[in-house]
Image (cartoon, rainbow, N blue to C red):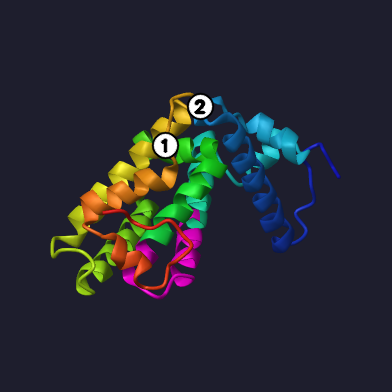
Amino acid sequence: MDTTGRRKQNTRGRGELLREEVLAAGVRLLDELGDDQALSLRAVARAVSVAATSVYLYFPDRDALVLAAAQRCHEELVAVGDAAEAAHDHHPAAQLRARIVAQCEWAQAHPGLYKVLHESGVHRRLGMPFKEVMVERTRAAVQRCMDAGAAPPDDALTVAVDLRTAVNGMLAQRINEPDLPWPPVTDQLDRFLVKLVGLRLSHVHGAGGQGEQGVVG
């Protein structure tokens, strides 16, 4: 591999491959660092075995790379939530719970990336409008619970925002203060679902969710 940064730009496909390698390296380093300000494009270039000038061909500055990495992570979060929801198609309450649990599991597996996604300087400076997709997915899931009578009628967006705020805050505290005597994640999530959404145990287990700890109430 040419490490001088003077790779031949012979095909568009090769250029897209190098961009993907750079982005993947940025994601890996951000997960290790948990801090976008600690990331350097030179470190990313070393991880891909190219000169820093090659990285600048695709990402003009660190913020651009961090933003692209955050969008990639957000897409993964949406995807794992969608897959979990699809696997629990027996009741809207089970679907909502499965979506939130899957997203929490992703965050716990990638704490550094989760911090960057929610606490980065790039988020404050540039914003991350792509995160609206997650808000809409949660709102739609909450609305289905209301439509099915599993949750009391309310403004689904307000409830979804409250739920996301509670879940994100809980995850941030667990990541930043790991030594506290935390209860099981699902216990906290179930309390959020009961208190903020209005779900009950029967809404999850009564639909065939035996064997999985369900919403308590």
The disc labelled 1 sits on which kind of residue? Pro
Name the quarter where the N terminus is drawn: top right
Q: Find the residue positioned furthest to the left.
A: 154
Name the quarter where the C terminus is drawn: bottom left
In the rendered image, residue 117, in percent from the top left (x then y), is placed at: 45, 41
190 is within the stretch colored magenta:
no
Using a 10 Å C-alpha cutoff, classify the residue at mark 2 as few (fewer than 14 neighbours), some (14 to 19) or many (20 or more).
some
The disc labelled 2 sits on which kind of residue? Gln
Q: Residue at the location (44% across, 70% down)? A: 88
Does dot 1 land on a helix, a strand or a loop? loop
Alpha carbon separation for disc pair 2 and 1: 32 Å
Front-most of residues 10 and 77 = 77
Q: Residue at the location (29% across, 48% down)? A: 192
Vertical placement of residue 162 versus 205, above or below: above
Label drawn at residue 72: none
Does dot 2 land on a helix, a strand or a loop? helix
Disc 2 versus disc 1: nearer the observer: 1
- Quarter residue 96 falls in: bottom left
Label drawn at residue 183: 1
